[in-house]
């Protein structure tokens, strides 16, 4: 695991440094800006979906779905981050404990 | 922030905001530390990510993809793609900071959502730019210290837990991503892109190795970005943050953790 930890940390640093080092006009392009602003939306949404429904290469419905849905309700109610993740974990764990979901 | 404020008042206000943001970010750090260790990374690797990578969404993504069995390369690439926006933050913040050499390297490492948002929230011309510069460095230092302390606490705490699944930790990971995504879902375009990306990733899940469907979904952002003409209003993916009072600007999300 160390190679990916160190190489991607270095890569993330170089991405930050690039912004500080290249001439303004290189990255100051509306399309580049749009893509950079949309990438986190795309990646985070895909991560939410996959981590909620995927188990290896198959799609399953288990306690995670209820946990994430509960987390979404907490977000709508403007709960802070730790509350959101704890609610999600407690709901999923509770359903499993009582045998209501896999 | 008003023109009448003296430098002493301005400085106090900047430092207070910086401390507040640092503490708020600590909550995410605890979550990251716990998830990382529960996902199978060692304590030292978890701390290395917070000390060296120091950009929250990338760290969560790396750990999440590994937890899902996605493999090192997919995990690293997802983390890097999420780090691309920091390049734009650097581009935006460099003229404000005007630093070179070693100081520039330190400034680069601290260039994340929070520092960019807090620096840009200050009037760039106020106090000959000192206010915006102080906001960047003070927020950067505060977030760096609190993020790493919180990671330490979370990582130590997770070691005490037993079976991660019994504690619903596999539901905690997507909930954490949802919380990071939430402040960026302002307006119709980000919602549409989020939904399409989620559908694309799920549709590809049966056909690709774990980790790859998420990378493929990044193409949705690329295509949408290329199609958007200059006439489209700049996508503002950050909310006004009630806690820090930071203005939304350039997509930096002060309320979203060091995303």
Image: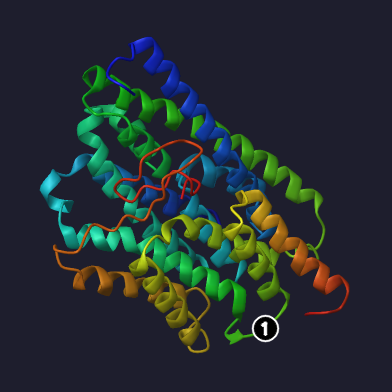
* Chain label for disc 1: A
Residue A97 image position (x, y, % from top left):
87, 71
From the top left corner, tell me how far across and down residue A100 is, in percent.
83, 79
The quadrant where residue B123 appears:
top left
Left or right of A64 in this view: B213: left
> As drawn, is A62 to the left or to the right of B193?
right
Residue B134 left/right relative to B223: right
Look at the image and tell me whether residue B172 can be seen. Answer: yes
Q: Which scheme is used to colour this image of the protein?
A: rainbow
Q: Where does residue B241 sit, x and y in percent of width and height?
A: 45, 43
B235 and B208: which is toward the camera: B235
Q: How many marks?
A: 1
B43 lies above or below B18: below
Q: Is residue B194 left or right of residue A67?
A: left
Residue occupying image coordinates x 25% and y 46%: A18
Q: Nearer the viewer, residue A89 or B46?
A: A89
Rendered location of residue B79, percent (x, y): 44, 59
Q: Look at the image and tell me whether residue B165 can be seen.
A: no
Q: Is B174 above or below relative to B87?
A: below
Circle 1 Cα neighbour tier, 10 Å, few/some/many (<14 / 14–19 / ≥20): few
Q: What is the quadrant of residue B232 in the picture?
A: bottom left
Q: Quadrant of the N terminus of chain B?
A: top left
Q: Residue at x 26, y 74 (%)?
A: B223
SS assignment at label 1: loop
Residue at the image position 33 percent from the left and 51 percent from the top: B251
The residue that mark 1 highlights is: A61
Residue at position x 65%, y 85% from top?
A: A60
Place residue B7 in its image quadrant. Answer: top left
């Amino acid at each position: 695991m160390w190679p990916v930890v160190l190489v991607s940390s270095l890569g993330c640093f170089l991405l930050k440094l690039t912004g500080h080092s290249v001439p303004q006009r290189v990255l100051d392009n509306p399309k580049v800006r749009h893509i950079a602003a949309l990438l986190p939306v795309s990646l985070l949404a895909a991560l939410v979906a996959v981590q909620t429904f995927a188990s290896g290469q198959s799609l399953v419905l288990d306690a995670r779905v209820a946990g994430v849905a509960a987390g979404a309700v907490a977000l709508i109610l403007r709960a802070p981050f730790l509350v959101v993740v704890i609610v999600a974990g407690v709901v999923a764990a509770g359903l499993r404990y009582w045998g209501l979901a896999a | 922030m008003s023109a009448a404020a003296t430098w002493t008042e301005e400085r106090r206000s900047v430092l207070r905001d910086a401390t507040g943001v640092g503490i708020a970010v600590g909550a995410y750090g605890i979550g990251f530390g716990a998830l990382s260790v529960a996902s199978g990374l060692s304590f030292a690797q978890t701390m290395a990510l917070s000390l060296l990578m120091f950009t929250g969404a990338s760290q969560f993504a790396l750990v999440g993809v590994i937890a899902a069995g996605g493999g090192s390369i997919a995990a690293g690439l997802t983390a890097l793609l999420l780090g691309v926006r920091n390049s734009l933050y650097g581009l935006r913040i460099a003229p404000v900071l005007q630093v070179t050499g070693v100081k520039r390297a330190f400034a680069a490492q601290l260039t994340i959502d929070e520092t960019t948002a807090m620096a840009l929230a200050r009037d760039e011309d106020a106090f000959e730019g000192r206010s915006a510069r102080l906001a960047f460095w003070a927020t950067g230092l505060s977030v760096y210290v609190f993020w790493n302390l919180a990671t330490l606490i979370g990582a130590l705490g997770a070691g005490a837990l037993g079976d991660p699944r019994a504690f619903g930790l596999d539901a905690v990971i997507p909930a954490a991503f949802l919380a990071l995504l939430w402040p960026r879902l302002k307006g119709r375009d980000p919602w549409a892109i989020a939904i399409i990306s989620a559908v694309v990733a799920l549709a590809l899940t049966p056909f690709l190795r774990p980790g790859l469907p998420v990378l493929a979904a990044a193409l949705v952002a690329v295509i949408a970005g290329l199609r958007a003409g200059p006439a489209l209003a700049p996508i503002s993916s950050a909310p006004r943050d009630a806690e820090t009072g930071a203005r939304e600007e350039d997509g930096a999300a002060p309320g979203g953790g060091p995303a």
